[in-house]
Amino acid sequence: MPYTLLILLPFFTASPVHAQLMKAKEIFSKADSLRGTLTPFRTCYDIKYYHLDIKVDINNRFISGSNLFKFEAVENFERLQFDLFDNLSVDCVEYQGRTLSFERSYHAVFVDFPNTIPKGKIDSFKVYYSGTPIAATRAPWDGGFDWKKDSKGKPWVATTCQGLGASVWWPNKDHQSDEVDSMLISVAVPNEVMNVSNGRLVKTEKLDKHYTKYHWKVRNPINNYNVALNIGDYTHIMETYLGEKGPLSVDYYVLKENKNKIKHLQNNTKQTLEAFEYWFGPYPFYEDGYKIVETAHLGMEHQSAIAYGNKFQNGYLGKDGSDTGWGLKWDFIIVHESGHEWFGNNITAKDLADMWIHESFTNYSEALFIDYHYGKEASQAYVNGNRKGILNDKPLQGPYGVNKEGSGDMYLKGGVLHNMIRTMIDDDEKWRSILRGLNSKFYHQTVDYNDILTYLNEESGIDFTKIFEQYVQHKSVPVLEILQRNNGEVFCRWIAEVPDFKMPIHIGKKGQSKTRYEINATFQILPIKVENTEELDVDTFNYYIGVVECR
């Protein structure tokens, strides 16, 4: 049997308590805590509705306007916090015809009300603001405004702010735990271009000879970083997809120069919606429709308005990260960003620390797309091929309360983890019902690590607690230690950072079918006898583990 130890054993020296202490010692700024922590100044109110109303001065890269906050008081309060990056000016905060006093600390704004807002009251205030927003130099990996021009020299502008935060360009309660229930996005842009945002276009308003305002209504809950502007010289093509909940409007906004390339988007979109409605259930935002909007940057999962910049080609800019060939049969950005409509947009992590929920399931959605159209064997080959990009540098889960996500391994390693779970369940119909059930139970909700784990445990009948703790909260993978005695008996145990780690594994003799065995941290005998360990066949194709042999 080949030696396939993937992780150096010294990585297993840290205990969970020690790991938590190490996390606690990480240095975070006050700005991180103000943005990431749910203080009473943020939990005291629940956002119900926003009306973001702004003008974009493209020539001067300047924005100005307002945002109406409609909220319900969760507790009695006289002061609250909203968020806006400190390079942007808070011109005034208006409440019931009065201008309120406020103070700023980094990117947090604290507003004082003249009277106590009583628990249960529905109330509102409006923030007027202006300034030059941060320019994204490498969108979508950094946040802000992406100021570009198309090949004809016309403005081509977009926002992208995942991770950095929506408050980089508009005032809001910038924490993922509180999604606004609905929203109106009104954007005034120069007449030579148009703006496309989330939801449905409900009104176009000619302001003067220079500007037109576009009003987009979002009828479903939406997290802040998904709210987007897309400004360009677009052409619009509309069609209807007959999905699980009936007709779904599908809209494409591409630069006029690329109108003849629309067929590529249409083919990939139809295949994607078909596969994902099969695996995950109905598209979660029928009321807001589904849009793909061409952008100068590569892409982003902006809810109901997916940003697309993959240049009308299959793969990831024409490449397949798995090196299996399966990644070249579909457009990566359409598939991946559409997967986020279910995991990230429908089901949203409450804290940025659990961004692995968004990215792990969405990475795995790529494999399920392949499974639906090309079969399970191709799907698992794709997952296995992605392993070479895993770094095992730090945990997938970040520290809570400081606006920090975990390792970039949340994509590839996260996808591998879900494929392992499928293998352990060993019942594809049950696995499909679990994936659909997740999107049904947590429909339009925010979740955390325990929500996902508890649901998987209950619905599968398997305790994944130790497995998730090892693969999500620690950086290394478990090692299966195999011991063979002279009489041919085989003993196995797991070596892992998690105390009392246990995980099933499929093992058999080469050339024979494998059996699922429950293995823990104590040596146990397998009902298999071999003359040497090379006769053993451990499923290291579907299980991302290390294997070490002892004689």
Image: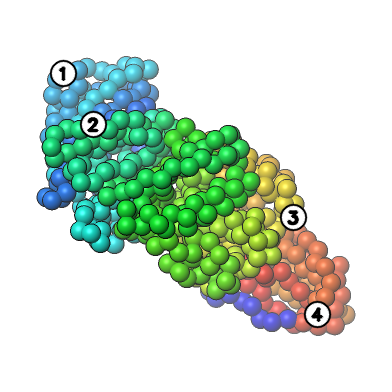
Query: Looking at the picture, how far across and down is residue 117, in whole percent?
Result: 28, 18
Label placed on residue 426: 3
How far is mark 2 from mark 1, CA to CA? Answer: 26 Å
Q: Which residue appears at 37% of the width and 17% of the height?
A: 120
Please tell me which residue is depicted at 43% across the width and 54% down the height of the picture: 262
Closer to viewer: mark 2 or mark 3: 2
Tell me the amino acid under the disc marked 2.
Answer: Glu
Query: Which numbered disc, 3 or 4, marks the residue closer to the eye?
Result: 3
Q: Where is mark 2, residue-wise?
A: 205
Image quadrant in which the C terminus is located: bottom right
Q: In the rendered structure, find residue 97 and report the number of the disc placed on it.
A: 1
* Distance from Cα at disc 2 to Cα at disc 4: 74 Å
Provide the residue designation for mark 4. Answer: 535
| Mark 3 burial class by Cα count in 10 Å: few <14, some 14-19, many 20+ | few
Q: CA distance from mark 2 to mark 3?
A: 56 Å
Sequence-first disc among 3 and 4: 3
Q: Secondary structure at mark 3?
A: loop
* Percent position of residue 425, x then y: 72, 53
Residue 279 visible in the shown view = yes
Mark 4 or mark 2, which is nearer the start of the sequence?
Answer: 2
The part of the image, by quadrant, that contains residue 2 is bottom right
Say which amino acid is labelled 3: Asp
* Cα separation between marks 4 and 1: 81 Å
- Crowd rating for badge 4 (residues with CA inside 10 Å; few <14, some 14–19, many 20+): some
Instruction: Tell me which amino acid carries mark 1.
Output: Gly
Q: Quadrant of residue 246?
A: top right
Q: CA distance from mark 3 to mark 4?
A: 24 Å
Q: Quadrant of residue 124?
A: top left
Q: Amino acid at mark 4?
A: Glu
Please give left or right for residue 126 compared with residue 140 in the image: left
Please give left or right for residue 152 compared with residue 182 in the image: left
